[in-house]
Amino acid sequence: MTSAGKLLLRLPMSLHARAKTLAKAEGVSLNQFILACVAEKLGKLSIAETFVRQKQRHSDATSCPTCNASPRGPRCPTKCDENH
């Protein structure tokens, strides 16, 4: 990758054709479509990393019934975060 942010990307012909078809259907350039796909994937990874960090932080929350109820539940309304 150059300092200008350009990237030479080699795709199998079938993947390139599918991406081109979807980009056309969405009315965007192939570049814009691939950029959106990369951004979406990075966003999902960021959310997953956040869940992992919260789960690790709350794994020792034996005294907090809200934290123990569901690792994916709502954020604990108490200040148990400070106790971990």
Image (tube, rainbow, N blue to C red):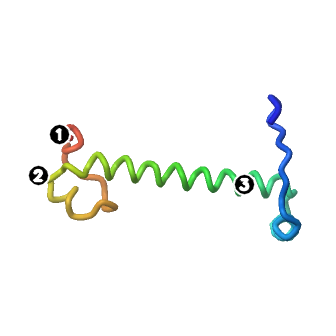
Q: 54 or 32: which is nearer to us?
A: 54
Mark 2 falls on what kind of element?
A: loop
Q: Amino acid at mark 3?
A: Ala
Question: Could you tell me residue 22's position as x and y percent?
Answer: 81, 69
Q: Earlier in the sequence, mark 1 or mark 2?
A: 2
Mark 1 falls on what kind of element?
A: helix
Q: Amino acid at mark 1?
A: Asn
The part of the image, by quadrant, that contains residue 67 is bottom left
Question: Could you tell me residue 75's position as x and y percent?
Answer: 30, 53
Asked if the residues shown at circle 1 and circle 2 are in contact, with their CB atoms under 8 angstroms apart, the answer is: yes
Residue that label 2 marks? 63
Q: Earlier in the sequence, mark 3 or mark 1?
A: 3
For discs 3 and 2, the disc positioned in front in the rendered view: 2
- How crowded pointer 1 is (Cα within 10 Å; few <14, some 14-19, many 20+) is rated as few
Residue that label 1 marks? 83
- How crowded pointer 2 is (Cα within 10 Å; few <14, some 14-19, many 20+) is rated as few
| Quadrant placement of the N terminus | top right
Which residue occupies 80% across, 28% down? 3
Question: Could you tell me residue 43's position as x and y percent?
Answer: 58, 51
Residue that label 3 marks? 36
Mark 3 falls on what kind of element?
A: helix
Which residue occupies 54% across, 52% down? 45
